[in-house]
Image (tube, rainbow, N blue to C red):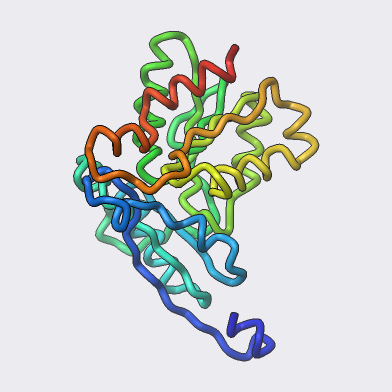
Amino acid sequence: KIHYMFGGQAAFPIVFRASTGGGRSAAAQHSQSPHPMFMGLAGLKIVMPTTPYDAKGLMKSAIRDNNPVIFFEDQMLPRMGITGHVPEEEYTVPIGVADIKREGSDVTIVAISKMVVEALAAAETLAAEGISAEVIDPRTLVPMDSGAIRASVRKTGRVVIVDEACITCGAAAEIAALVTEDPETFRAMKAPVKRVCAPDVPIPYAPIMEQFCIPDRDQVIAGVREVLQ
């Protein structure tokens, strides 16, 4: 808040790089997704890339930003074999701009970090059933690209929001609010918002219990089918 307290005369350009997410049986202390706790701190920007391309581009933007930025990286993305082309030449990915990872017309799936991987897998399965799902990766939680998300929901009329964090007071709740608070988007909706998140419990150590808590593609598919009923 230094920028505000000194009337814009001082800045605090710093990047905090942090890991997030479970899936490694690291128990409650090292498996939580803490990003919602920081979303309400005014003046702090939060980015959560999914792909290697976005990670490099967003990191460069974060370093160049004149504000404090938390750069969250999901611990499981490298273990999941997520790869992609990363240009050696200079480029940036702008903070505050979402990315449409897959276009669709029946339902919008807004997924955060490694949940994008689960959402894309779910969309592939649903496509075989004739269901066209659009997958949006916000990439930045603060500021959020509300325009891209609302435009997609106005097109499809349905939205499923997928986040590994606990369901209460999370990023999914904020996305649900920005969707339903916009009159034009709300009028276009054909079904209530569906959130697919972790329950409000510490992430267990036991693998089978941990898997139960962390959202996956099957839960995404179930959520999509629910809003399509």
Q: Residue at x 41, y 60 (%)?
A: 58
- Say left or right for 169 vs 31: right
Estimate the x, y position of residue 89 in percent, counting from the top left.
29, 61
Q: Nearer the viewer, residue 202 or 19?
A: 202
- Quarter in which the C terminus is drawn: top right
| Relative to 185, residue 178 above or below | below
- Say left or right for 137 vs 228: left
Q: Classify residue 56 by image quadrant.
A: bottom left
Q: Residue at x 55, y 45 (%)?
A: 168
Q: Classify residue 4 by image quadrant.
A: bottom right
Q: Residue at x 24, y 45 (%)?
A: 205
Q: Residue at x 51, y 60 (%)?
A: 37
| Relative to 56, residue 8 above or below | below
The residue sitting at the top extreme is: 129
Estimate the x, y position of residue 90 in percent, counting from the top left.
34, 64
Residue 156 visible in the current orientation: yes
